[in-house]
Amino acid sequence: MRAGEHERLALTLAVGSRIVPIGAAPASAVPDRDAVSALWDEALVLKQLGIGKPLIARMAQRALRNRTTIERELLHGGGVREDAYYAGMARLAGLPFVEAIEDGQVTDIRGLDSQLQRPTQIRLNHGHKPPVTVIVPEARRFADLTATLARLPDLRTSLAIAAPSTVRQAVWRAGARRRSHAAVNGLFEADPRFSARVVLAGRQGFWIGSLLTAFLASLLLETDATLLVLHIVLTLIFFLSLMPRLTAVVQSRRSRPSAMPALLPGQALPVYSVMVALYQETEVVSQLLTSLDRLNWPKSRLDIKLVCEEDDLGTIAAIKALEPGPQFEIVEVPACGPRTKPKALTYALAGVRGDYVAIFDAEDRPHPDQLLEAYQHFSCTPDDIACLQAPLIIANAKASCISALFSLEYSALFRGLLPFLARHSMPLPLGGTSNHFRTHLLRAAGGWDPYNVTEDADIGLRLYRLGYRAEVIRRQTLEDAPTSIPVWTGQRTRWFKGWLQTWLVVMRSPSLAIAEMGPCAFVVFQLLIGGMLLSSLAHPVMILFLTQSTLAMMRSPGTAMSVLDKVLFYTDMINVLGSYATFLALGATKMTRFETRLVSWRWIFIPVYWLMMSMAAWRAVFELRSRPFFWNKTPHRPTAARPEKEAVNGTAPRP
């Protein structure tokens, strides 16, 4: 619609004229006459409710721009409370208004969850009294309701009106047991080959036990020969696992970030959902809501689920105390095992309304335009692109040596390795936050595995095995890294344990995995996940081998060493020093100057960081046996005041 047409149409609706000045604007930019008629019907009802004409005019402009309704814009930014609005609708219709629905009044029937996505009506049972149908009327169809009531006055005894949030809360409670069972057991029952519920399959246990027994026996009988074979095998695996990251360094692209394409004239944005799993996060709730409020997306088209454990009363109370807008909804997950983030997200997935859904963590500060970029990217890519990964940037790199090295690691992963893998259509080990999914594909894949404690890597591999791919976008998410060794170790142990779970799930049937992924992607998976696990576990051993070779070379001339010893010595040196150099090069070259200043000289502790990762990896191996589904919670704190402007608003990081 041409400049000024929206305003004239909105004002026309407000003052009561039925003349709609559409003009000669392009058809794609002009609302059809049915939409205009619906806006007119809404305006009449809203005036009867006592809402002023100027406010109706402003909300009509928004409705035309966002392709929604005046009613929806009023409730999502017009200063009108939902309960007061629907109570007024009930008075206007002459029907009772239901403020709250008691437990047991709603029966869990097939299709009930559709009322979570679009609340329209539910049936209330009152014991010995006749049942009552609670409806959520729309202003644009209110005339039809009043006409029906005038024609059939007896309906008034069996109808009532409630707000959408009241209906959703009742539906969440009514279907809680069924939904919990589906979240915990759905993937295992539908396709057990993708579930980590069985930690070690029978054949896997047999082969691992057999290999371990054979190794120990060989070590006792032929110690020197066994150690030599172990040295050769570990050196080769370590060297091969270094190749993907080394290739990513060599093929690194240095290009300026491309501008985000503009929306087409008249292009309507879809509903976009955001899910955040929260547990014991009272301290960061305010920061989280502020960050999500900054998202550059119409609030009337946002569906934000704050997913909390039902017994986490502190977090729920903290959210309610801030009185978030109607785009926010608290989803209370029943307290049942396993108590993991993926189980909570899968439970809440039933209520997601958006065509797309983004996942964030409690401490995240996403770029305001991240949803816009993800939507634009989805719109321009084939339907087999199921997920987009936004880069994660550590904002507190200056806080400690651990956070500085964490920052380097994240830069290497999210701005170096993942874009490289995406360009070559390889499987992406996703990060646990800032993932953007096509909702219908995520549901078709079964949601997240509640038993896998790195649900991000698992869902990325599963989508790839099902024939879908993931790509990356540029608008970042800021978050804080752990600054203490105990917190870092707990988090990293959980990650290693989940990566090990993911590797075991894929390796239950290697031939099937090769058929689904393709030989090249299967090899890349082995190098990225399997190689990373083994190289982390074997890193201290590799240092011992290198030290032993160095001492041997110092004791005897190089000419006295065998060719094999020389090859092993130089390969060990390449492996150990190359892993440090690749870690530094892939991370530092992708950082802005501001970020490199935050890291400063702390990169010299990379060898210590690698040893810490080895410690966490070994701890994960033992924990996989004793507590396979234990979720080691990472505590979060509000962001301290520090200069983050350049990281947020400055030049986007290099791709």
Image (spheres, grey):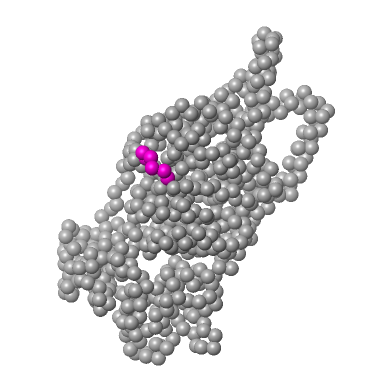
Which residue is at a point 40% across and 91% down the rendered structure image?
154
Q: Is residue 268 left or right of residue 529?
A: left
Residue 167: x and y in percent read 45, 73
Residue 22: x and y in percent read 18, 65
Q: Is residue 619 left or right of residue 62?
A: right
**Relative to 404, does residue 346 appear above or below in the rendering?**
below
Which residue is at a point 47% across and 70% down the rendered structure image?
169
Looking at the rendered structure, the number of numbered marks drawn on it comes to 0
On the question of residue 351 being in view, the answer is yes
On the question of residue 358 being in view, the answer is no
Residue 579, quarter of picture = top right
> Where are the magenta residues, as a range?
639-644
**Relative to 562, does residue 472 appear above or below in the rendering?**
below
Does the magenta stretch mainly form a helix, a strand or a loop? loop
* Front in this rendered view, residue 452 or 32: 452
Which residue is at a point 54% across and 88% down the rendered structure image?
128
Residue 296: x and y in percent read 33, 52
Residue 397, quarter of picture = top left
Q: Is residue 169 left or right of residue 576?
A: left
Residue at far right of view: 221
Which residue is at a point 52% across and 61% down the rendered structure image?
313
Residue 471: x and y in percent read 45, 44
* Front in this rendered view, residue 566 or 542: 542
* Front in this rendered view, residue 594 or 167: 594
Residue 190, quarter of picture = bottom right
643 inside magenta stretch: yes
588 inside magenta stretch: no
From the image, which quarter does the C terminus lie in?
Answer: top left
